[in-house]
Image (tube, rainbow, N blue to C red):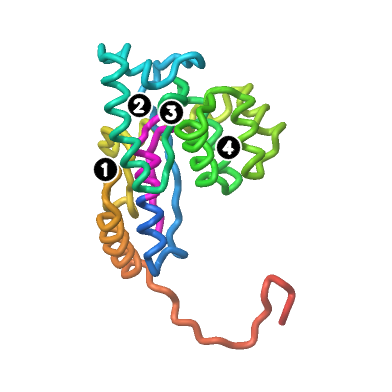
Amino acid sequence: MKVEIWSDVMCPFCYIGKRRFEDALAQSPHRDEIEVEWKSFQLNPDMVTSPGTNINQYLAKAKGWTLEQAEEMNAHVTGMAAEAGLTYNFDKAIVANSFNAHRFSHLAKKHGLGDAAEEQLFKAYFTDGKNTDDINTLIELGTAIGLDAAEVKQTLESDAYAGEVKEDIIEAQRLGVRGVPFFVLDRKYGISGAQAVPVFEETIEKAFTEWQQENPKLDIIEGDSCGPDGNC
């Protein structure tokens, strides 16, 4: 069964939602039969990358708040992240447009490393204060999960996967996604936001039970045969 997750690197609830979903999936007896696919979504496609500005400063200016108000709001989210085992450093988080990060994620997905890429991106953004719009940073993250540095560089210096990112965003609109994280289970059930672990557990079980009924395993009668490893 497939679970599709729409998210944005700059969304603090997306990282929290990722952890809570993973906690729920780890408890599921069906976890080995569930495929997770990450999808792109941009909360602020017009955001201009500004390495000298952190998120607290950006929010204060954009919302007309004081810096103290921005820090107070993010302190609440930091506490939620800590409960999920995550460390958020908003005073280090760099304002960065997420389009290149999404293209990087699509490259990683091509190599079966989509989930690993998302984890690296979230940690780089929220914990380590790295510029996730910077090609050298993305090359570093890519090599950390096993991607070829030259391929990452070549990809990001071109417009590769730009179409795939835009298609994900259009698909989200068609599905009625208004915010992220957004989890779609077997194209039947949608979960909006970083819900509590039991919500994920219950929905995974419900969706999988229905998927299993619609996709029963073959009742196989064993006999003499040859396998792909050459053994007969």
Q: Which residues are magenta?
A: 1-19
Give the quarter of the figure containing the N terminus: bottom left
Which label lies toward us, 3 or 2? 2
Q: Is residue 114 above or below residue 129?
A: below
Which label lies toward us, 3 or 1? 1
- Residue under label 4, please give it: 107
Question: Residue at 33% of width from left, 48% of height from top?
Answer: 184
Q: Position of residue 158 (x, y in %)?
A: 62, 22
Which residue type carries mark 1? Ser
Q: Position of residue 180 (x, y in %)?
A: 32, 36
Q: What separation in Å lies between label 1 and label 2 (alpha carbons)?
A: 15 Å
Residue 42 in magenta stretch: no
Q: In the shown orientation, is residue 182 left or right of residue 47?
A: left
Q: In the shown orientation, is residue 227 left or right of residue 200?
A: right
- Answer yes or no: do the residues labelled 4 and 1 have beta carbons within 8 Å? no
Residue 5 in magenta stretch: yes
- Answer yes or no: do the residues labelled 3 and 4 have beta carbons within 8 Å? no
Label drawn at residue 43: 2
Q: Is residue 88 above or below residue 203?
A: above
Q: Earlier in the sequence, mark 2 or mark 4?
A: 2
- Answer yes or no: do the residues labelled 2 and 4 have beta carbons within 8 Å? no
Question: Residue at 68% of width from left, 79% of height from top?
Answer: 226
Q: What separation in Å lies between label 3 and label 2 (alpha carbons)?
A: 13 Å
Q: Position of residue 179 (x, y in %)?
A: 28, 34
Q: Earlier in the sequence, mark 3 or mark 2?
A: 2
